[in-house]
């Protein structure tokens, strides 16, 4: 059986895009490969994988939002790379960097799934404006150097591939779209019952967001839009299903008609209770949470960032508003709040989009094809 080493700086129990991706993917491929995962030790690991898991202790210092760096033992990484047929890196963090360098040193093929543009995310997660530009420049230079060491970079969209090429990243790019488990993320039998199940009055109109509470998600714009909404309507609730940066969480805690749950392992009950899902992000690649909400037949209101521009058809399966424009967001929420037929139509179209194009079966099949395309020649030597 082929030996696959996954090197990741995002892993459970901390929920983010990378850990959600791996939590869905590992069970789908662990019978096909002899899997080893090197990851940070972020606490008790609830899911039981067949894969062998090696975890490094973390620095007790928050570097960005809710991110804590692993203390990497390079010798351990190097030994595991030597044993593997293929190294699969998830991002440019301490573990990912060690995996790429060790892979290059031991002449092993290295594949990266490009979940994010690190030079955009990391500077924006610091919260200090005057250091954003130098961090962006330094991070971009390091990322380009490391990306060019990779054999293949898997990207979530063709636009993403073109962007990397413009930056003179010459590694081969393959497009594999992210997907959703449509059997798990599905509409509730009763919206009213879904609201009751999480302690919300079923008569309330629920405006929701799910996922990390971080600076680049720009939840302040959502907060401003909701405050304006409450001045006109007294029957609405803002539901923030997630947690993260404490100073942003404080914006929502203890406020009338606002619920913030903290980090959650399972967002399905919260999506199902929402009447509208809002993603006000400044930066995204795909936005898995938006796709999950769509699969639950929730109409979405989003900013035109990343791959979202390709799978949201404004006015058909969702609505788009300009970044940082709380008034435009407010008007979109009001439109859906006052038009039940539009909510229902967009919700159904949203789920149709996911079921037709973005399932986990398609994602895992695409990932396997890329992995095997590199591994197959190895068996002939």
Image: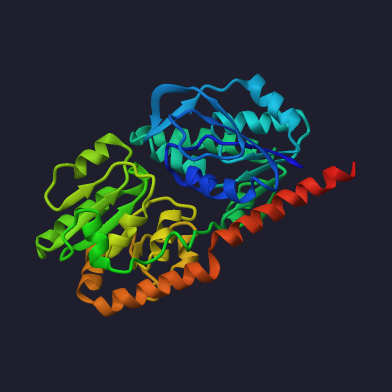
The residue located at (60%, 51%) in the rendering is 28
Q: Is 299 in front, or is 328?
A: 299
Q: How is the image coloured?
A: rainbow
The residue located at (26%, 40%) in the rendering is 248
Q: Is residue 380 left or right of residue 5?
A: right
Q: Quadrant of residue 349?
A: bottom left
Q: Is residue 218 left or right of residue 285?
A: left
Q: Give the image location of residue 251, x and y in percent.
A: 20, 42
Q: Give the image location of residue 25, x and y in percent.
A: 57, 49
Q: For the N terminus, give its image quadrant.
A: top right
Q: For the C terminus, give its image quadrant.
A: top right
Q: Give the image location of residue 87, x and y in percent.
A: 69, 38
The residue located at (47%, 38%) in the rendering is 12
Asked whether residue 326 appears in the rendered view, the answer is no
Q: Is residue 118 left or right of residue 102?
A: left
Q: Quadrant of residue 127?
A: top left
Asked whether residue 72 appears in the rendered view, the answer is yes
Q: Is residue 354 left or right of residue 348?
A: right
């Amino acid at each position: 059986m082929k030996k696959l080493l996954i090197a990741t700086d995002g892993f459970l129990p901390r929920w983010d895009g990378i850990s959600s991706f791996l939590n869905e993917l590992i069970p789908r491929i662990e019978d096909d490969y002899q899997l080893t995962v090197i990851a940070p030790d972020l606490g008790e690991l609830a899911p039981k994988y067949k894969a062998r898991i090696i975890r490094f202790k973390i620095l007790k210092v928050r570097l960005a939002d809710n991110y804590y760096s692993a203390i990497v033992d390079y010798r351990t990484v190097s030994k595991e790379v030597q044993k593997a047929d293929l190294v699969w890196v998830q991002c440019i963090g301490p573990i990912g960097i060690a995996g790429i360098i060790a892979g290059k040193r031991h002449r092993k093929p290295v594949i990266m799934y490009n979940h994010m543009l690190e030079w955009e995310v990391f500077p924006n997660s610091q919260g200090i404006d005057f250091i954003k530009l130098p961090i962006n420049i330094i991070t971009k230079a390091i990322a380009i150097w490391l990306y060019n060491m990779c054999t293949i970079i898997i990207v979530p969209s063709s636009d993403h591939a073109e962007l990397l090429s413009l930056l003179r990243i010459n590694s081969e790019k393959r497009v594999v779209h992210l997907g959703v488990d449509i059997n798990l993320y599905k509409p509730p039998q009763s919206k009213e019952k879904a609201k009751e199940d999480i302690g919300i009055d079923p008569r309330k109109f629920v405006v929701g967001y799910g996922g990390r509470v971080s600076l680049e998600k720009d939840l302040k714009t959502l907060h401003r839009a909701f405050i304006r909404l409450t001045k006109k309507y007294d029957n609405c609730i803002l539901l923030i299903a997630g947690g993260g940066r404490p100073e942003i969480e404080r914006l929502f805690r203890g406020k009338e008609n606002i619920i913030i749950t903290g980090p959650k392992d399972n967002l399905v009950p919260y999506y199902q209770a929402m009447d509208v899902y809002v993603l006000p992000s400044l930066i995204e690649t795909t936005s898995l949470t938006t796709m999950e909400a769509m699969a639950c037949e929730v109409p979405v209101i989003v900013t035109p960032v990343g791959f979202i521009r390709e799978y949201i058809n404004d006015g058909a399966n969702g609505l788009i508003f300009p970044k940082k424009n709380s008034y435009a967001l407010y008007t979109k929420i009001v439109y859906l709040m006052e038009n039940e037929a539009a909510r229902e139509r967009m919700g159904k179209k949203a789920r149709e989009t996911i079921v037709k194009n973005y399932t986990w079966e398609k994602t895992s099949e695409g990932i396997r094809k890329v992995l095997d395309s590199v591994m197959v020649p190895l068996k002939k030597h």
